[in-house]
Amino acid sequence: MVVNTVAMHMSDGIVNAPTSVIFGVIAIAAIGLCAVKARNELDERTVPLAGLVAAFIFAVQMVNFPILPGVSGHLLGGALAAILVGPYTGALCIAIVLIVQSLLFADGGITALGTNITNMSVVGVAAAYATAVGLYAIARRRTPDVPVAALGVISFIAALIGTVCAAMAFVVEYAIGGAGVTSLGAVATYMFGTHALIGVGEGLITAVTVMAVARSRPDLVYLMRGARAEVPA
Amino acid sequence: MKRWSFWIAFAAATLLIAGVVSYFASSSPDGLDSATLQGCQVTETADGEQLSGDCIAQHASEHAMSTSPLADYAIGGQDGTGGIAGIIGVLVTVAVAGSAFWLIARGRRAADDKQT
């Protein structure tokens, strides 16, 4: 099978210690906030869904898909989690996946957990969810009953934007305290280009999954629940 | 019936992806890894990969959990065990996430009870 070291996330030492500490503090604060806010998203019905969504994202992250010769990408999962279970619960899903991967599978450094959580669980989820909410509001202005296909398009765009924003968060961390001589411009260009392509894969996986859930259990899709709760009719 | 079929299908898809589809994953470095490898030549040697040149990845340190029995998504470093490692990961993730979310939801019910 794979002989290469199977690593999908930032390793220890990619950014210096002070930077790791700063983003460690940011990540802990964000997880604390999410744990408080997630109370409003979680009930008896959504707890099992949220647990399953986290496990699903763990599974899909294992499946790297090729994007360029010799370069692959994998799902980050921020848009998928936020659309299905809500932004705060979704961010916790991604954080739990990253912690399990780091502690059990030696994937993603332990001191790099702060940066990895900030990128994928905070920035990725926030950018994707903001995009999804904005686009869903626009879609609902045209028709109150948004078709599943439109939900798929919204999920695709939200996932693409979330992926690129998460990659740019890494660029910010590299700018603050990156190790190595590679120029910031080169890293930024390379990260943007590869993650625009990864974002297309992320968008497809997210759209297919969200549409499958929306077809069989529309009541479980957080993005649709939130909109219905706002407009009682 | 419909209610149960949704959960069974979702769980089955998750296990299938981790246990079977994961074998078809690309083994090329991902976008982030290949960014950190820019400027380096990777050569395969008997004791793993050797980096020459100048790149970000050279600053990466060995993972503190690299001796974990599940390190690199394999059981004890054995080839071909990625699917089993994946299924273990799915079960651990669902257990950790499920209990965390259950505790958070229970905290909400406790807060609601206090108000009434």
Image: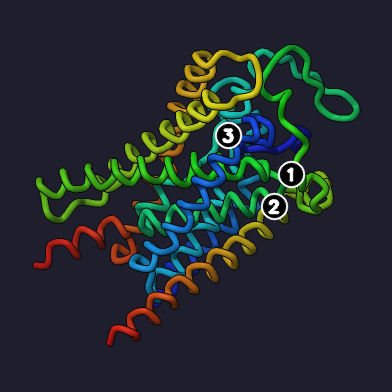
Report the amino acid beneath label 2: Leu
Residue B103 is at least partly visible in this image: yes
**Residue in view at x 50 percent, y 26 percent:** A171
Quick check: B1 left or right of B9?
left
Q: Residues within 10 Å of mark 2 (few under 14, many from 20)?
A: many
Give the Cα separation between the discs numbered 3 and 2: 21 Å
Report the amino acid beneath label 1: Asp
- Which residue is more in the foreground, A203 or B5? A203
Q: Dot 2 falls on which chain?
A: A
Q: Secondary structure at mark 3?
A: helix
**Residue in view at x 43 percent, y 76 percent:** B107
Quick check: A72 left or right of B23?
left
**Residue in view at x 65 percent, y 35 percent:** A17
Quick check: A165 left or right of A110?
left
User: Same chain for marks 1 and 2?
Assistant: no
Q: Which residue bears the numbered disc 2?
A: A103
Going from the N terminus, do you reach mark 3 or mark 2 first? 3
Q: Position of residue B91 (x, y in %)?
A: 63, 64
Q: Position of residue A127 (x, y in %)?
A: 35, 40
The reply to whether discs 1 and 2 touch (Cβ–Cβ < 8 Å) is no
Colour pattern: rainbow
Q: Secondary structure at mark 2?
A: helix
Q: Is residue A82 above or below residue A205?
A: below
The reply to whether discs 1 and 3 touch (Cβ–Cβ < 8 Å) is no
- Circle on res. A19: 3
Q: Which residue bears the numbered disc 1?
A: B72
Q: Residues within 10 Å of mark 1 (few under 14, many from 20)?
A: many
User: Same chain for marks 3 and 2?
Assistant: yes
Q: Mark 1 or 2, which is nearer the eye? A: 2
